[in-house]
Image (cartoon, rainbow, N blue to C red):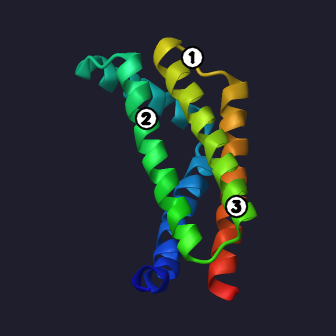
Amino acid sequence: MFLKSLAPPLTIIVTMIFLGYNVIQLSYARMQVIDQVGAYRDFIREQQVGIRILRKLNFRVLVFLIAFYLVLLFFSGFAWWFLFFALVKSGLSAWVSDIFHVRAIVSKKVSQSLLWMRRLDAVGNSLLLSLVLYLVVFA
């Protein structure tokens, strides 16, 4: 099948992109995140987008990315239990992302606990993506 032969190289490429994004998230200092949140908040105000619309858009984008990645993992030959684990981890990441977006827009400051939650999420994502990369390349 065409998709089964195309899935592993595509999985490697997408995994490297996601892994790079998570490593960059880990490298940000607190002040960089606060500056980015301020710029993001200003952009949202300029565009006059409500929190409800923003959350809905964020949810749709995350569902699409998670579904796309899980389909790639499925056609790359991963076991069902691993797909379920990736789905749960992705769901937790989506939840953390939603909390961060809401707090970044509604409140004026980003708490230290929220930053640590984002960092732990990025570490978990990096470990999962590293495992996927290892299994696709070497298994």
Q: Secondary structure at mark 3?
A: helix
Q: Residue furthest left?
A: 47
Q: CA distance from mark 2 to mark 3?
A: 22 Å
- Lateral position of residue 86 relative to residue 52, left or right: right
- Lateral position of residue 133 relative to residue 42, left or right: right
Q: Along the polypeptide, which appears first: circle 2 or circle 1?
A: 2
In the rendered image, which quarter is residue 38 located in? top left
Q: Nearer the viewer, mark 2 or mark 1?
A: 2
Image location of residue 80, percent across then percent down: 70, 64
- Lateral position of residue 85 relative to residue 58, left or right: right
Image location of residue 24, percent across then percent down: 55, 53
Q: Residue furthest top?
A: 107
Q: Nearer the viewer, mark 3 or mark 1?
A: 3
Which residue is pictured at 60% across the width and 22% down the height?
Answer: 110
In-front residue for pair 89/121? 89
Residue linked to disc 1: 109
Q: Secondary structure at mark 2?
A: helix
Residue linked to disc 2: 58
Using a 10 Å C-alpha cutoff, classify the residue at mark 2 as few (fewer than 14 neighbours), some (14 to 19) or many (20 or more). Answer: some
Q: Is residue 128 above or below residue 43?
A: below
Q: Quadrant of the N terminus?
A: bottom left
Mark 1 belongs to which amino acid? Lys
Residue linked to disc 3: 128
Circles 3, 1 touching at the beta carbon (< 8 Å): no
In the rendered image, which quarter is residue 36 located in? top left
Mark 2 belongs to which amino acid? Asn
Image location of residue 53, percent across then percent down: 35, 22
Circles 2, 1 touching at the beta carbon (< 8 Å): no
Q: Along the polypeptide, which appears first: circle 3 or circle 1?
A: 1
